[in-house]
Image (tube, rainbow, N blue to C red):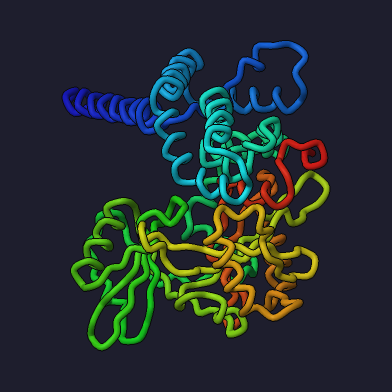
Amino acid sequence: MAQPVVTWEASRLVACVRRIIRGLYRELWQNSLPHSLISVRYLLPGQDQRVRLHRQLWWQSRPNWPRFVWLLIEFWVWLRWISFSGWRVSWRVLRRRGPDVQVQEGISLWQQGQKLIHLSIGCCVPPREVYRFRLYLEPERIWDLVFDHEINAYHRWRSQPLGLGDVSRALLADKLRQTEVLSGIGIPMAPILACLSRGQAADLSTWLTEGTRLFCKTRSGNCGIGAFTVWQHNGLIQGQRFSGERLPDTKAVSRAWRELLARDAALVQPCLLNHPWLAPLAVGDAAITIRYISCQDREQTCCLSATLEIPAGQDVQSGQMLYVILPIEPESGQIHPFPDALLPSSDAQRRQAGVMTRLPSESMVPDWPILVEASLQAQRRFPDLWAIAWDWVVTPQGPRLLEGNSGWSGAIPQLLYGGFLQGNILR
């Protein structure tokens, strides 16, 4: 009778060892950067609040690892970055972005390379973010900003005074439960036709009919990993991955569907139509989304940032989907152009100019007050999280919420309104 107990304990041990191995592989090899900026200034006394906060974000970035193990991991990743991988990535980014900066801003490749080495190799700033924030002009601004590799630690730090509930984050990570809960308090949600278990064998034709379009995505996770759109026309089934890759036939669609079900439980949703006023802005019929980032402290709930994200076709070389992002004035819903100086290239400026020519002057997002009130109401449902990014589609029937995310990137809000650690931003 003791044998099953021994077997069960052995299986638990094996599962635990596998989790540790996967975690070490992810941290030691898949991560190319440490989890925050790394600077000698961390060791010096008398540093200003921004430097101390970056040090705190780094120190708190992996709370589940034993500190000694985590320090060894971070030392290895840092050593690999400054000795090999950082130089390779920096050189690749310099070759791609440097010539445009040289032409547009008159900064030589040699000068750009010097700043890139100082910031990326010397302080572990991601090279692409050196160019995104134009830090080659003002290197000291690195301490004002929260970069992508430290944003998760920043979200946790900002939510700690409010309670930082694991239940809230788990609910936001589960798109099905999130839809059920938010629908229950009156938030207009995008409908879900079906939820399939991971590994389940299912035929998409159950929900796919002539002339309809479906959107298939994982039940958890974000960034659209594995997601795709599928449609049937004249008996032919085709689709397109969220990344922009075409799925030209039934075989390709079936393969994408199997890959999605192998990754996680999957949700099947109808594709939402764009509001007639917004639809002409997009290339094709892909959904135009509004990202409304709500934030709160113990006293009030408000808007941190709002942007319109418009599909603008595919990149010829990579096949990736391109977007034009337009800031929205939170108080009125008025749409503005993104500042040209902050756009990454002349091609991005031309894409935005093309969209702006199709946008009437003094343009307001349809049903903006409804969207704002629903976003703030949804934020109040999560009183222990400081900020949540809500992704909306404004349809002919009104706004529909796709999902909320607690681990959103801070790049766009910081480009528009300044770094999260600036004195006038930090609260």
Looking at this view, is 23 or 49 the one in front?
49
| Point 74% across, 71% down: residue | 334
Residue 48, x across and y down, in percent = 77, 22
Instruction: Establish if 292 lies above or below 419.
Output: below
* Residue 285 relative to residue 256: left or right: right
The quarter of the picture where the C terminus appears is top right
| Point 21% across, 72% down: residue | 250
Q: Is residue 132 in view from this perspective?
A: yes
* Residue 6 relative to residue 354: left or right: left
| Point 58% across, 45% down: residue | 132
Q: What is the number of callouts on the image? A: 0
Looking at this view, is 339 or 181 the one in front?
339
The quarter of the picture where the N terminus appears is top left
Instruction: Establish if 61 lies above or below 179.
Output: above
Looking at this view, is 356 or 261 the one in front?
356
Residue 398: name its quadrant: bottom right
Looking at this view, is 37 or 96 the one in front?
96
| Point 46% across, 41% down: residue | 93
Residue 26: name its quadrant: top left
* Residue 45 relative to residue 250: left or right: right
Residue 195, x across and y down, in percent = 37, 64
Residue 295, x across and y down, in percent = 71, 50
Q: Is residue 183 in view from this perspective?
A: no
